[in-house]
Amino acid sequence: MFSGVPFSGGQREAFRHEASKGSGSLPADATWLERLVRYAERDDLLLYVTAFIGVIMPALVYVLYHKAHSKKEQERLEEEAERRVVTIFYGSETGKTERLAEILADEMEDYSPPIVNMASIDPEDFKTYKGVGLFLISTRDNGKPPESVEWFMEWMDDVDSKTKRKANFRHIRFCIFGVGDSRFGPACYNKAAKILSRRLRSLGAKPLCAMAFADEKRSTEIDEQLRCWSDDVCEVLEDYITGGRSGRQKGTTTESEYDSEDAKREKEALFSKFLSLRRRRRSRT
Ligand SMILES: Cc1cc2nc3c(=O)[nH]c(=O)nc-3n(C[C@H](O)[C@H](O)[C@H](O)COP(=O)(O)O)c2cc1C
């Protein structure tokens, strides 16, 4: 019986036929699924199919996982790159602030910031901006912003009242340098810069540093006042760009700090002190 003589081809076929009969012929009312399974069982088809799935599925899962992961990583890198973009926005009535914007761009050449006149901002582009905005804005008659920029200020107010949420500009970080003259009185002094700051914050944008005001009344030239500010900004920017990914970074001013009148006065006083110290140091050399 166990002579090792293999079955002949005819015997094997007959055996298979018997086996298939033995596994039970399907009842007449068998469902299509049962028929399909029975059909697949024949000639080891089911075995091949399951073996194939067993090999292919893990490979497929691996490929899909890898693809999803690398897409996420790419998105993260793109977001990071957008966060590092620095743009100088200016609003100017007679051109002085525009000139300051050019000086600032030179001072910050490491960041190669483009200079954008706020009068020609595209609102749709601005809505998707995720970088740092350095805003330079002057104030004209009775605390008004430059005429060419009025629409932008109103648009920000409008977006705010329409969306009623702070999501839109939450990625934007900003620093503001107001250009004005304190001889126009405290109510009007650098009022446009103050309004701009309020509007940006009400839309969710976050200040990176305390607002600074150039005062034409000071004996220090406004160019020099700007240069002092840009030194501060460079430091804060470096912190921001190389530092934490979100929330408060070193040098970031929280809203409450920013809002506090005392803090503002203190910073103004410090800025003036800093300017006169620097002036004295320069005159000595
Ligand atoms: C007619 C006139 C009105 C001004 N009104 C204000 C004012 O209300 N508040 C303020 O801080 N500065 C005021 N300033 C000072 C300007 O903001 C300052 O001269 C500034 O450098 C102008 O910059 P710009 O040429 O970029 O607009 C006024 C200047 C002029 C000539």
Image (cartoon, helix red, strand yellow):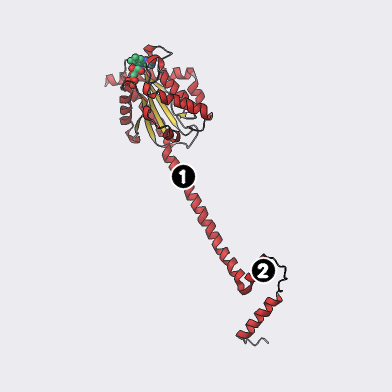
* Beta carbon of the mark 1 residue lies under 8 A of ligand 1: no
Q: Is residue 18 above or below residue 182?
A: below
Q: Is residue 115 above or below residue 19?
A: above
Check disc 1 and give the amino acid type: Glu
Which quarter shows the N terminus?
Answer: bottom right
Q: Secondary structure under badge 1? A: helix
Q: Which mark is residue 35?
A: 2
Horizontal and vertical percent for residue 5?
A: 62, 87
Name the side, left or right, on which 55 lies relative to 115: right
Query: Label 2: how many residues lie within 10 Å, few (<14), some (14-19) or many (20+)?
Result: few
Q: Viewer-nearest of labels 1 and 2?
A: 2
Name the side, left or right, on which 59 lies relative to 143: right
Which residue is outermost to the front?
A: 28
Task: Determine which quarter of the picture holds residue 30.
Answer: bottom right
Task: Determine which quarter of the picture holds residue 45.
Answer: bottom right
Could one spot residue 64 in this view of the protein? yes
Check disc 2 and give the amino acid type: Arg
Location of ligand 1 given as a quarter of the image: top left
Question: How far apart, in angstroms, are the residues tagged by discs 1 and 2?
Answer: 49 Å
Residue picked out by circle 1: 75
- Which residue is rendered at x = 52% and y = 56% of the image? 62
Horizontal and vertical percent for residue 142?
A: 40, 14
